[in-house]
Amino acid sequence: MNLIQFTKNNGKRAVGVIDKGEAHIVKGADSVYRLALKAADEGRKLKSVIADKGLGSRIDPAAILEDGRMLSPIDHPDPAHLYVTGTGLTHLGSASARDAMHKSDQQAVETPLTDSMKMFRMGLEAGKPAKGQEGVQPEWFYKGNGTIVAAPGAPIPSPAFAKDAGEEPEIAGIYVINKKGVPFRLGYALGNEFSDHVTERVNYLWLAHSKLRWCSFGPEVRIGDLPASVEGTSRILRQGKVVWEKPFLSGEDNMSHTIANLEHHHFKYALFRQPGDVHVHMFGTATLSFADGVRTEPGDVFEISERQFGLPLRNSVAWDKAEKLTIKTL
């Protein structure tokens, strides 16, 4: 079962359920967040809460997306209480592009392992611990809050000071924190962890800067466990023509960490267990157009798809105009 959020033709919000090839509106629901929090606070399954609401008329999710009425599959009434974070170097193929990117700045004939490769090897050796054991912590970064989330189909803005505007096709875990401070996972969605790889390449210590960009996830959130193998496609279209395309792999069969280990090292911080908050946690990628020398242009369209997640995630890229920043004294 997958969930979507959208606006109806009258402008009012609604929630839809997609199950076994059919899509229906959820009666009396206008927020996945409220449905999920109710389930988490009452100790119930989300499917049970939805069943109590009941299903209404049939809907056409593809048409909703085409009309520009699709919303992100979860949001928060106060965007400051939706955290967007992520991990890197978590997939079996993720180290090669990153390692090459950082090695290019080191001209010595005999170059020691980069920090990226060291981190990747740590994951290979201890990212999938035995049950009851704690594995090694991954690379982690903060991306922003709900104000930097672009809806499926909407442009992803890149700041005027950015050096690059590149996609990162990923799987995102979607979570709410109940009234007792316990994290509950709704499920997973396709994600585009949009980043500035040129800035990151200058110096690895600028990774944090490079990640403070907009992103997108959805259109659907898949309720339940993540499939062991996720086999999707990431492509870039320019004026309707594909200029770059590659498969992207995820799921634990293709990862150097377990999902449980990545979740543990995020939610072990009490800061991230505040009642009522929403977390969108990106799990990393092994596929980057930047690693193949692609430079995006305004108007390019990112498309990330995987059959188990329903509709593809599409967003164009747009560059913001430069703005003058003034810091005033009180």
Image (tube, grey):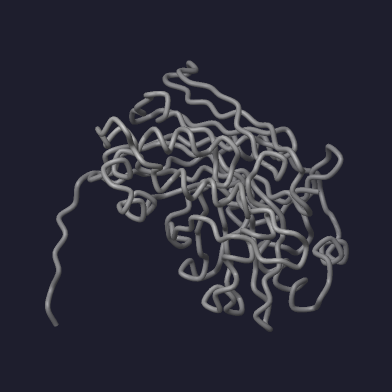
Query: 295 or 312: nearer the eye?
Result: 295
Determine the residue positioned at 55% across, 73% down. 272
Name the quadrant of the C terminus: bottom left
In this image, 76 relative to 292: left or right? right
Image vertical order of residue 171 relative to residue 273, above or below = above
Report the number of numbered marks. 0
Image vertical order of residue 103 relative to residue 19, above or below = above
In the rendered image, the residue lying farthest to the front is: 110
- List x then y, in percent, for residue 119: 49, 50
Determine the residue positioned at 31% across, 37% down. 164
Query: 57 or 29: nearer the eye?
Result: 29
- List x then y, in percent, for residue 300: 41, 28
- List x then y, in percent, for residue 71: 58, 50
Determine the residue positioned at 60% across, 38% down. 92
In this image, 26 relative to 182: left or right? right
- List x then y, in percent, for residue 149: 48, 53
In this image, 16 relative to 83: left or right? right
Determine the residue positioned at 34% across, 31% down. 298
